[in-house]
Amino acid sequence: MENKQCLDIEVLFELADLFKVFGDSTRLRVMVTIADTEMAVSDIADSLHMEQSTISHQLRVLRQNKLVRVRRDGKQMYYTLDDDHVKKIIEMGLDHILE
Amino acid sequence: MENKQCLDIEVLFELADLFKVFGDSTRLRVMVTIADTEMAVSDIADSLHMEQSTISHQLRVLRQNKLVRVRRDGKQMYYTLDDDHVKKIIEMGLDHILE
DNA sequence: TCAACATATGAACAGTTATTCATCTGTTCA
DNA sequence: TGAACAGATGAATAACTGTTCATATGTTGA
């Protein structure tokens, strides 16, 4: 932990909030689903066999945390992962689990 | 996401459970506190100005998820982070926040 | 403009979780 | 052996969170 002096309470609260977002299987599944491709909300929902509303609610959480990018095309909203950072965090977690 | 075929529902549930552990500021603070040093429970509690019971409960969660190691020395239990994996996950998250 | 469609959103509910208090277990040393 | 101490744990509670239902917003094409 090289930047330990930066790790005051506030930063750790923020960090906890970030990890909270990853700590839900629905959000994780959405993130993996749109990791390498843009997808419309209802297609994500279909793909995961979940309700449109559920996915929409969770996409909002991902949006608020800047983990996804959105683009409107007509009636549809296309979501994709924001950056490779997010993938890296997921892969780090997988490494820990699959070791 | 290179091992995408491994990312079935079960693994993602496990992964979510792992991130849930990181998604609490108390646990995060405990992890950072014992990242580079062994510490007894009451010293962690004092250092964070929290109750012994609170820390003990959270250390149990960390233990159950194999994120910390324990060693008894007399009446005291000395905790430390289990491996560098855990630090890496925290640092990845910090990178995302502090960018 | 209006019907049809895609998505977003608010309220309600159920399930989960962190903290506290009280108490118990286990260790030391006198 | 027993008092003092460190830590663990169960129960209770308050706060939080994910999902669902119903509905609202916004876009398209006729």
Image (cartoon, coloured by chain):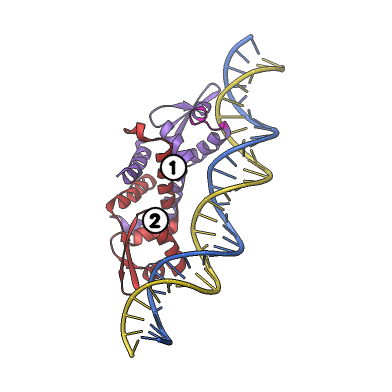
Chain colours: A red, B purple, C blue, D yellow
Q: Is residue A18 above or below residue D26?
A: above
Q: Can residue A32 be seen in this view?
A: yes
Front-lying residue, A14 or B51: A14
Give the x, y percent position of residue D15. 56, 48
What's the residue at 45%, 33% (across, down)? B69
Give the x, y percent position of residue D11. 68, 43
Judge the density around disc 1: few (<14), some (14-19), many (≥20) Cα neighbours within 10 Å: some
Q: Is the C terminus of chain A in the top left, top right, bottom left or bottom right quadrant?
A: top left
Q: Give the range drawn in magenta.
A: B45-52
Label 1 SS: helix
Main SS category, magenta section: helix
Residue C6 found in image quarter:
bottom left
Q: Is the N terminus of chain A in the top left, top right, bottom left or bottom right quadrant?
A: top left
Give the x, y percent position of residue B51. 56, 32
Numbered tag placed on residue B30 in the rendering: none
Residue B51 colored in magenta in the image: yes
Could you tell me how far apart the alpha carbons at marks 2 and 1 are, in whole angstroms? Answer: 16 Å
Numbered tag placed on residue A64 in the rendering: 2
Q: Report in which chain the residue with disc 1 lies.
A: A
What's the residue at 37%, 44% (across, down)? A96
**CB within 8 Å, label 2 to label 1:** no
Which residue bears the numbered disc 1? A13
Label 2 SS: helix
Q: Are marks 2 and 1 on the same chain?
A: yes
Q: Is residue D26 above or below residue C20?
A: below
Residue C28 found in image quarter:
top right
Q: Report in which chain the residue with disc 2 lies.
A: A
